[in-house]
Image (cartoon, grey):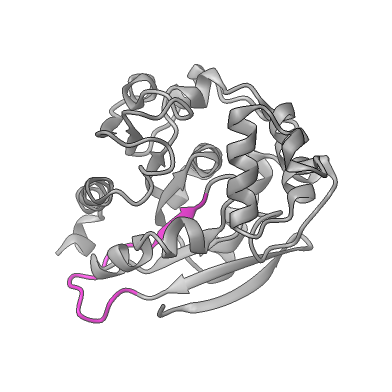
């Protein structure tokens, strides 16, 4: 993997990130892309291992990806008040500031899509376009089960976990080497609500991409219809996890970013 792995202090919290340059053979060079991973994942699992970083670099993008606080190599915090999508969005903004990036395309998966929404709402001048992957109508409708998932993370014996969705999240978190206590605090944090009115106020080009077999994300069109001018892409036959690295997903996002390059950079 070509790129620099480093960390920076975001208001006292160490945030690990990857900064990978555009492929030297790619032409023309395009705006950077900021990638934000999903809950219980990290930038390596969500974006490197699925070849997203390589794909975007080959398309001419500098790629920035970071571990959301409580995840990956970033600081693990056990105070629920130190988590939440608006706080994560502040970390993302400070990372762009740290790297001197004035404007970027932004893509978030699942929880990362919520973070990307808050970033685009608070700092639209820094977001050239935004992609909400793995989260459609349920960004607004919400998805119950936070306490069941937190219980699954804190259970000493995995056999105690009978809730199927909670068990799948725990199994995934264990597979990524996550700090289960930190993730429990993260999911129990006050969940800042995103309303239909809020997403209706988005004024940056938006793509919603969700698997057609993904009950966690909800229909892509259901969210896109609430956002002026938004596009949607159905990742056919894919559930939540399998939609991440889908080839058609990558192609749709790359084409979307290309359509929303500044005229001078698009060549």
Camera-side residue: 55 or 118?
55
Is the residue 193 above or below the residue 209 in the image?
above
- Residue at the spot x=25%, y=81% of the render? 24
Quarter in which the N terminus is drawn:
bottom left
- Residue at the spot x=34%, y=27% of the render? 220
Q: Quadrant of residue 21?
A: bottom left
Q: Residue furthest front?
A: 159
Quarter in which the C terminus is drawn:
bottom left
Is the residue 119 above or below the residue 92 in the image?
above
Q: Which residues are magenta?
A: 22-37
Residue 45 shows in this picture: yes
Residue 54 part of the magenta-drawn span = no
Q: Is residue 231 left or right of residue 137?
A: left
Camera-side residue: 175 or 102?
175
**Residue 101 picture location, percent across and down:** 47, 65
Camera-side residue: 225 or 136?
136
Q: Which secondary structure is most common in the magenta stretch?
A: loop
């Amino acid at each position: 993997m070509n790129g620099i792995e480093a960390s920076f202090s975001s208001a006292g919290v160490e945030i690990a990130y990857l900064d990978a340059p555009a492929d030297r053979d790619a032409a023309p060079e395009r705006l950077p892309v900021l990638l934000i991973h999903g809950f219980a994942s990290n930038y390596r699992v969500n974006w490197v291992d699925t070849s997203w970083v390589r794909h975007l670099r080959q398309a001419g993008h500098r790629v920035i990806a970071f571990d959301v606080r409580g995840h990956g190599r970033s600081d693990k915090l056990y105070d629920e008040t130190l988590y939440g999508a608006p706080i994560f969005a502040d970390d993302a903004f400070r990372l762009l500031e740290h790297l001197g990036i004035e404007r970027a395309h932004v893509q978030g998966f699942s929880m990362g899509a919520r973070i990307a929404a808050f970033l685009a709402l608070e700092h639209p001048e820094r977001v050239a376009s935004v992609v909400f992957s793995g989260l459609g109508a349920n960004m607004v409708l919400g998805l119950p089960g936070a306490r069941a998932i937190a219980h699954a993370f804190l259970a000493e014996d995995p056999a105690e976990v009978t809730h199927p969705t909670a068990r799948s999240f725990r199994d995934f978190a264990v597979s990524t080497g996550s700090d289960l206590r930190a993730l429990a605090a993260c999911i129990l944090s006050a969940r800042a609500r995103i309303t239909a009115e809020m997403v209706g106020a988005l004024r940056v080009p938006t793509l919603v991409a969700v698997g057609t077999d993904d009950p966690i994300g909800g229909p892509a069109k259901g969210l896109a219809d609430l956002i002026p001018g938004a596009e949607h892409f159905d990742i056919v036959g894919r559930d939540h996890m399998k939609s991440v690295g889908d080839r058609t997903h990558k192609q749709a996002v790359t084409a979307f970013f290309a359509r929303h390059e500044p005229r001078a950079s698009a060549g």
